[in-house]
Each structure stands twice: as C-alpha cells, then as structure tokens.
Amino acid sequence: MKVLIDTNAYSELMRGKEEIASFLDSAEVVYLSVVVAGELSAGFKGGDQERRNRSILKEFIQEGGKTVLLPVDMETAERFGLIKDSLSRKGTPIPINDIWIAAQCMQTGSVLLSLDSHFSQVGGLLLWEP
C-alpha cells in the first residue's frame, strides 16, 4: 500500500497519534508531497523550534528509505487542472494546496492520510478511514 501524508496528519503523528503511526507502519511507501513540505516549512518558521522541527522532518524522510519526497511535475499539473475544474463545476472548491496534494495522490495511486474532510469532494481519491 502507498500512502501520501497530509500536513495535518504529519503534525498529529509528531504529537504521538498512534493510529496514524500504525497506519504508516503498514504502508509499503510513504509519500511526502513538496507541497506538504512547504506547508510544514511555513509552520516551522512561525514556531520557536524551527531547527528541531526541520531535523525531525529530515529524519522522517530518511527513515528506512520508506518515505519519498514527491515533486510536482507536468502530469501533476494536468491532474490539478482536471480536479480544480471538476470541483469548480460542482461548486465545491477546496484549498488550492489541497488540490495539488490530491493530484499527487491520484498520480501515485496512493491513499491520502489526512484529517481534512473536504478531500471527500474529490472524486476517485482514495482516503484513509480511521
């Protein structure tokens, strides 16, 4: 099983949420989107433990070679366009960064590990169900 971890799920994992840790342990590969990495980086800047948090994220990416940093490419961009158009037509917009994350998730055939319910608006997206 392939999993793409969202920003809020990563944050809860760092707070010790066992349910998330257990789900990630069962994954064959864990993707970390560069979009999620950007959101985390912005959050680190706003806190008083930026250096520590960056170090923990670096360890997470390197941990056992299971976590892969996932870039945005042209295929991602095409999927982004399709998803955004579909959401607009249905009148169910979601945050722009989350559209990028959904596009990468679909591109890799991954289950999205997120605590955001609005991802259910994206048709065909595989969602983690606790």
Image (tube, rainbow, N blue to C red):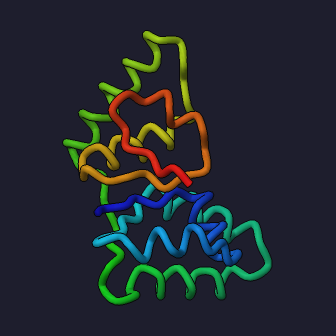
Residue sitting nearer the eye, 4 or 22: 22
In the picture as drawn, the residue positioned furthest to the front comes out as 130
Find residue 94 and report its horizontal and vertical position in percent.
Answer: 55, 30
Q: Quadrant of residue 53?
A: bottom right
Above or below residue 66? Residue 89 is above
Q: Is residue 17 left or right of residue 1?
A: right
Find residue 46 and report its horizontal and vertical position in percent.
Answer: 75, 66
Going 33% across and 32% down the picture, which residue do you hit?
124
Going 41% across and 60% down the picture, which residue do you hit?
34
Residue sitting nearer the eye, 3 or 72: 3
Find residue 127 and report its horizontal and vertical position in percent.
Answer: 44, 45
The number of callouts visible is 0
Residue sitting nearer the eye, 84 or 16: 16
Q: Is residue 6 left or right of residue 116?
A: left
Image quadrant for the C terminus?
bottom right
Going 50% across and 42% down the picture, which residue do you hit?
98
Find residue 59 and report its horizontal and vertical position in percent.
Answer: 47, 88
Going 30% across and 71% down the picture, which residue do you hit?
29
In the picture as drawn, the residue positioned furthest to the right comes out as 48
